[in-house]
Image: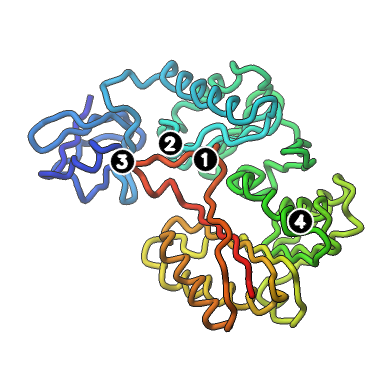
Amino acid sequence: MERLILNAREERRLLRGHAWCYRNECASIPECEDGDVVDVYSSDRRFVGRGFFQAEGGIAVRIMARHQAVVNETFIEERVAEAHAFRKRLFPGQNVYRWVFGESDGLPGLVADRYGAVVAVQTSCAFYGRHLDALAKAFLVQDGIEGVRLQVNHNVSRTGVVPEPIEVVVDGIRASVSLDCGQKTGLFLDQRANWSEVGRFAPGVRVLDGYCYRGMWSVHAAMAGACDVLGVDTSASAIEAANAAAVLNNVADRCRFECADVAEVLARGEKYGVIILDPPAFAKSRGREDRALGLYQALNKAALQALEPGGILITSSCSHFVARDAFFEALKRAACAAQRTALILDTRGASPDHPVLLAMPETAYLKCAVLRVL
């Protein structure tokens, strides 16, 4: 096994459970190929962990094991099975959930979502590209799985039966999921536990669903009794899917969807009882935090101004590089700029099928705030 040696004292964060060994922490890096399994040692030759090497980027090794386990087909199958057992406890009797959440499930750099009998798997890591057959088998041996769609960067392969699209039921809401035309793996399941929050405040009011994507927030609001729901997204295909979701769930009479810029819709001067903001990541790389915070502040200011007195703002950030405290500071500044008083009713994160690895704050990327605005 090739050995990567760390600089002095750089092992401390890894020994506490972090799963990323950065390139600038290394005293020596062995000559190996992208995706090779390597061992990480401290400067005094103490074993730290075993993982796979990445030839590019700031992360040199993603740690998979804290002991010298044999990383093979059995290793992958055991990790997939363990993750599956936990999700079945979280969602008994259901068949839509995030099955594997990367580092938190011991398969760093890998995400897998289940949609009924199909699993959608995505990664950018060469290690998994070398083990496609093992990955497919690990999911297919689990009860109820008939097909696996594997995407490594832009390369897609399918094993078994993978229909397109797939119709599923998520917490009583019907949805048609496209694995080929949608974003990520089909639905943004990290917001699953938060979608129902809108139901507490939607009855009898007008709702604006900003960045509605496939309409899950909108449909929840309409089914909870909203008198009118406007979903907005810049993606024409997302608007088409959101309209289809409203029809599937018999709420098309109260839902309308528009392909437009959210900021422009907020600037029209219309008032709403509830506004939902679930934008894409504004900071997609390190060093763009300040720009992202400015965008969050401006967007939320406009939403606060568009709310009726006593209205509810449900606002989120999925920017990995924007810290929770910084996001809430941006919300505070937005409220001040809008001259509105905002009360925090709840602060939330991702659904529990996206568990946060305590030693890796990076896995707690989603921030969601529920505000009452006076």
Please rate how many residues cluster around mark 2, counting C-alpha atoms within 10 Å: few if below 14, some from 14 to 19, many from 20. many
Q: Position of residue 177 (x, y in %)?
A: 73, 42
Q: Is residue 303 above or below residue 188?
A: below
For marks 4 and 2 on the same chain, the one whose residue lies earlier in the sequence:
2
- Pointer 3 residue: 18
Q: Nearer the viewer, residue 301 or 32?
A: 301
Looking at the rendered structure, the kind of residue marked 4 is Ser
Looking at the rendered structure, the kind of residue marked 2 is Ser
Q: Report if the CB atoms under discs 1 and 2 are less than 8 Å apart.
A: yes
Q: Is residue 68 above or below residue 253?
A: above
35 relative to 272 in the view: left or right: left
- Pointer 2 residue: 104
Looking at the rendered structure, the kind of residue marked 1 is His
Identity of the residue furthest to the left in this view = 44
351 relative to 232 in the view: left or right: left
- Pointer 1 residue: 354
**Total number of numbered labels?**
4
Q: CA distance from mark 1 to mark 3?
A: 17 Å
User: What secondary structure is marked by label 2?
Assistant: helix
